[in-house]
Image: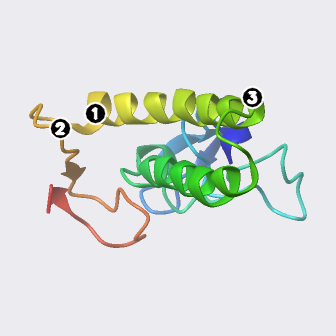
Amino acid sequence: MSDQFNRKDSRKATNWCDGTKMEIKTKYHIPHDLGQPHAEPWVQTNAYILHDTAVWRDLNLKFVLSCWRDYKLIVEKYLKPKDVRAEDILQYFYKESEIVVRNALEDWDADGDGMIENSGTADQTYDMWTMTGTR
């Protein structure tokens, strides 16, 4: 998923829930998936169009958690701390994770308290649940 973070696919799709047009994959957002098998997986990512996943509050932040998990459970287990590869992987994860957190706070922290607010729509990975504020 990390390699998909900086990709952009400007083609438009119709959001199945509200009928609006949306970009298939916006830059600096984690895709919902890596594409459909009958299309071009790995090239045409984010086949999910029920909602615009670029506005989901939790998908990108889950990516930050998965970076930490992967580093702790894989990199630390198999590479020595001073190994240049371990440092490169950590830098790679950190750079993208920092962008995710900054964008989330900039886009979705309406009152500046460090907590992102939900918009009252299904704007997270629980497809049909609506939430407002931090609850």
Q: How crowded is mark 1: few (under 14 residues within 10 Å), some or many (20 or more)?
A: some
Give the amino acid type for the residue marked by disc 2 in the picture.
Gly
- Residue at image x 49%, y 36%? 97
Task: Using the rendered image of the protein, determine whether residue 14 is visible from the camera's viewpoint.
Answer: yes
Q: Which of the two residues, 15 or 75, is positioned nearer the viewer here?
A: 75
Could you tell me which secondary element the residue under label 3 belongs to? helix
How far from the left and from the top, in percent, is residue 23? 59, 38
The Cα atoms of the two marked residues, 3 and 2, are separated by: 34 Å
Quarter of the rendering occupied by the C terminus: bottom left
Q: Residue 114 carries which label?
A: 2
Give the amino acid type for the residue marked by disc 3 in the picture.
Val
- Residue at image x 47%, y 53%? 65
Q: How many marks?
A: 3
Q: Which mark is residue 50?
A: none
Q: Residues within 10 Å of mark 3 (few under 14, many from 20)?
A: few
| Residue 1, placed above or below residue 128 | above
Whether label 3 touches label 1, CB < 8 Å: no
- Residue at image x 62%, y 55%? 70
Find disc 3 in the rendering and name its residue. 84
The Cα atoms of the two marked residues, 2 and 1, are separated by: 7 Å
